[in-house]
Image (cartoon, rainbow, N blue to C red):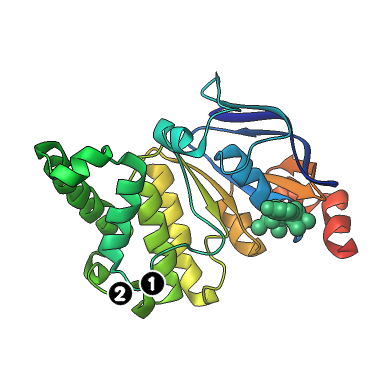
Amino acid sequence: MLIETTGLTKAFGGLTAVDDVDVGIEEGKITAIIGPNGAGKSTLFNVISGFHSSTNGKITFNGEDITKKKAFNIAKLGIARTFQTTNLFEQATVMDNVVIGHRLRTKSGVFDALLQTPRLKREERACREKAEEVLTFVGLQKESDRLVSDISQEAKKRAAFAVALATDPKIVFLDEPAAGVNPEETGGLVALMRKMVNNGLTVCLIEHKMQMIMELADHIVVLNQGKKIAEGTPEEIQNNDTVIQAYLGG
Ligand code: ADP
Ligand code: MG
């Protein structure tokens, strides 16, 4: 397993948002995390990516214990993520968003920035080249100079993928990558996620669009009220009574 959680728990005061969860994410595969609203899916991502500390349990990446690491160091290891609400700078161009995102993760020290050192200039150049490469990869090369506020919701989702990919991750966590996107446009995002995996990436996503998950995921993990209630192939999950109950029971 590329990522493995054991007994992972996150409590907010009296509320246990993630409750004793064991999840394994296999390298080179697409793993989907599903479950009703409030099930703890985003919190699981927040804890794995270091945005929240865990209350209990363990997280390993390639066998290495990363439980106590901070978000910045987890990102440096090659674990990237997108957010449920795309956190792009709306008044900046698509290109600048990718460059800024990249810089936030790989920044030089303050002195480099103040003194405009050769190292900083080198980094700038490398940053732009990388941004062009990932924008081409996600199919946004023609939109790179447009303001984020002027592009479609689907293009914003692609831009958020590009920001995540600019750090050369080994795994990307995508929180509701197709949320708010027209059904006719989700096909392109599905193709893009497949392309990521074909390029050696591991993908883990949260998504509500069930049809999309069923055709895309290799492995599905179902959460409900913080607990893992089922996991398996799309076929197994579709026919799982506990899962059906969780969705119908609300
Ligand atoms: P999902 O992504 O599956 O819809 P979340 O992980 O966002 O669910 O939320 C799980 C539970 O944890 C919800 O009850 C939510 O209100 C709560 N929660 C999430 N984040 C916080 C937080 N930062 N502080 C307090 N409660 C939170
Ligand atoms: Mg969520």
SS class, disc 1: loop
The residue nearer to you, when weighing 110 against 149, is 110
Quick check: marks 2 and 1 in contact, CB under 8 Å?
yes
Does the rendering let one see residue 39? no
Q: Quarter of the image holding residue 105? A: top left
Q: Is residue 43 left or right of residue 248?
A: left
The residue nearer to you, when weighing 15 against 133, is 15
Q: Position of residue 212 (x, y in %)?
A: 59, 61
SS class, disc 2: loop
Q: Quarter of the image holding residue 159? A: bottom left
Residue at the farthest left position: 118
Q: Residue drawn at (75%, 61%), measured in percent from left and top?
A: 37
Q: Is residue 107 left or right of residue 157?
A: left
Amino acid at the residue labelled 1 = Glu
Q: Is residue 52 left or right of residue 78?
A: right
Q: Residues within 10 Å of mark 1 (few under 14, many from 20)?
A: some
Does the rendering let one see residue 87? yes
Q: Which residue is mark 1?
A: 90
Q: Residues within 10 Å of mark 2 (few under 14, many from 20)?
A: some
Q: Residue drawn at (21%, 39%), measured in percent from left and top?
A: 111
Q: Is residue 26 left or right of residue 201?
A: right
Q: Residue drawn at (31%, 40%), measured in percent from left and top?
A: 106
Amino acid at the residue labelled 2 = Leu
Q: Earlier in the sequence, mark 2 or mark 1?
A: 1
Q: Residue drawn at (38%, 72%), measured in percent from left and top?
A: 90
Q: Which residue is mark 2?
A: 147
Position above or below: 244 against 80:
below
Q: Quarter of the image holding residue 77? A: top left
Position above or below: 89 against 15:
below
Q: Position of residue 191 (x, y in %)?
A: 43, 58
Q: Looking at the figure, which quarter contains the C terminus? A: bottom right
